Image (spheres, rainbow, N blue to C red):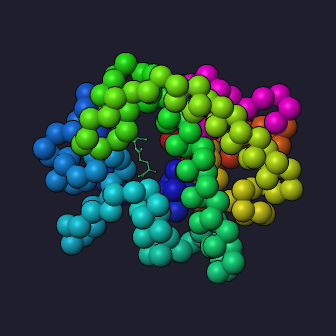
């Protein structure tokens, strides 16, 4: 979504996670942490987190700005993006990965085998509900997460809210600001790719 918002064309190589391609020798050379996305730079080095990739791309292609225009805006966007990833994305992941059979020995990403912990399924769901409460409150006073402008924090939050359908936790009817924001950002052409 970030790449589409920037209007960039970057060659994409799909990694088949359902067939554990991220654990194969080829992908381990790209990203030893075994997660997607990864971005290979012209000098052959690789960036291995969405945060690193988005900061890199924003520096080279500043328009349209997706990390804010001022230092204060940038600080706010990065602040929010980190919180969304930690308290939203990781919460959904906690509920999802500790339940899905395909993750029986990979409850955490990466090369080490971590077994599932049943009680983390419910905890992840509860954390996701609390995340939605927080998001709704934030969006009562803000059109987008960081204020009047669309940013990386909105992209991470949209991915998180959409991911939450897999753990059967969705924004509630009373989350009217969250629903309004979700409709707006989902309607962007970049969200439909
Ligand atoms: N935003 C994080 C997310 C990384 C992440 O959790 N990626 C998942 C897909 S959304 C993955 O690669 N999973 C591999 C696996 O489950 O083994 C990052 O860029 O590092």
Residue at the (79%, 53%) spot, across then down: 138
Furthest residue toward top = 101
Residue at the (34%, 29%) spot, across then down: 115
Is-magenta flag for residue 172?
A: yes
User: Where residue 22 sits: x, y (%)?
Assistant: 25, 40
The stretch in magenta equals 160-175
Task: Looking at the picture, tell me which residue is in the foreground, 38 or 84.
Answer: 84
Where is 121 relative to 147, above or below?
above
Residue at the (77%, 63%) spot, across then down: 147
Residue at the (44%, 75%) spot, across then down: 60
Where is 87 relative to 74, above or below?
above
User: Where residue 94 sits: x, y (%)?
Assistant: 50, 35
Task: Looking at the picture, tell me which residue is in the foreground, 188 or 15.
Answer: 15
User: Where residue 151 sits: x, y (%)?
Assistant: 63, 61
* The quarter of the displayed image where residue 165 is located: top right
Q: Is residue 100 visible?
A: yes
Task: Looking at the picture, tell me which residue is in the foreground, 152 or 98.
Answer: 98
Furthest residue toward bottom = 71
In the picture, measured across the screen, residue 135 lies left or right of residue 165, that is right
**Quadrant of ligand 1 in image:** top left
In the picture, measured across the screen, residue 23 lies left or right of residue 106, that is left
Is-magenta flag for residue 170?
A: yes
């Amino acid at each position: 979504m970030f790449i589409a918002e920037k209007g960039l064309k970057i060659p994409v190589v799909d990694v088949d996670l359902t067939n554990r391609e991220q654990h194969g020798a080829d992908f381990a050379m790209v990203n030893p942490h075994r997660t997607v996305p990864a971005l290979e730079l012209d000098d052959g080095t690789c960036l291995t987190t969405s945060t690193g990739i988005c900061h890199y791309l924003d520096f080279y292609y500043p328009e349209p700005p997706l990390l804010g225009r001022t230092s204060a805006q940038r600080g706010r966007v990065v602040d929010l993006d980190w919180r969304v990833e930690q308290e939203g994305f990781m919460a959904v992941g906690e509920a999802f990965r500790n339940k899905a059979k395909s993750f029986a020995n990979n409850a955490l990403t990466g090369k080490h085998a971590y077994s599932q912990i049943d009680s983390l399924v419910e905890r992840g769901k509860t954390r996701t509900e609390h995340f939605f409460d927080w998001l709704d409150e934030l969006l009562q006073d803000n059109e987008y997460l960081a204020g009047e402008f669309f940013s990386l924090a909105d992209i991470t939050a949209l991915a998180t809210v959409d991911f939450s359908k897999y753990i059967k936790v969705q924004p509630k009817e009373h989350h009217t600001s969250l629903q309004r924001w979700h409709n707006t950002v989902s309607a962007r052409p970049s969200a439909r790719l």
